[in-house]
Image (tube, grey):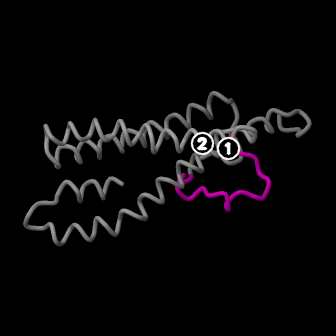
Amino acid sequence: MVPRLALHMMVNESNFGLLTPLISVLHGPIFAGVHVTHVELVQLLSSSELQATSQSLLHSSYFILGGSIGNVLWGNLYEGHGASGVYGLGMFVVAANAAFLMLALRVLEIFAGKRAPYSPRGLSLATTTPATKPPGAPGYAGALRELDNPKNGTV
């Protein structure tokens, strides 16, 4: 995402024809990677009873709230600071969100007091797809509940 925003920031009249196709080619894979990561993260963090509700909230907030607020906020910033200012700030926001997410997952792991079997630490969240988990494996919250279960002998 950050490289794509950097390319957007560099577009001007002299290199428009060169950078625009490159940016367009990057759009699909980057959107797919970000979307899959969000879906998988919600799947990992929600309990099995709330997975459908969690996915609905994710999509509602992403497409409805995010699109509306983003359009107003970034549109006003674009008018005031131009394209390079908006895309530069966008790179900072993406990097800050990634750092916050990694910190939040680490704090969740520490707060739980145990390391879950499918902990995102040390893994790229974009590659943590359902195919990497054994069939029937619980999500992150379910794995923590299993660790706390005295019947499993893992207390």
Badge 1 local density, few (<14 within 10 Å), some, or many (20+)? some
Q: Amino acid at mark 1?
A: Ala
Residue 21 is drawn in which quadrant? bottom left
Give the extent of the magenta segment. 123-141
**Residue at the disc numbered 2:** 56
Q: Position of residue 134 (x, y in %)?
A: 76, 58
Q: Amino acid at mark 2?
A: Ser
Q: Position of residue 8 (x, y in %)?
A: 23, 57
Label 1 with label 2: CB-CB less than 8 Å: yes
Q: Position of residue 119 (x, y in %)?
A: 64, 45
**Residue at the disc numbered 1:** 52
Badge 2 local density, few (<14 within 10 Å), some, or many (20+)? few
Residue at horizontal 59%, vertical 47%? 120
- Residue 155, placed above or below residue 11: above
- Of residues 18 and 96, the one nearer the viewer is 18
Residue at horizontal 23%, vertical 41%? 75
- The verdict on residue 127 being magenta is yes
Label 2: which secondary element: helix
Residue at horizontal 58%, vertical 46%? 41
| Quadrant location, the N terminus | bottom left
Describe residue 32's horizontal placement relative to residue 136 as left or right. left
- Residue 66, placed above or below residue 11: above
Q: Position of residue 104 (x, y in %)?
A: 52, 34
- The verdict on residue 148 being magenta is no
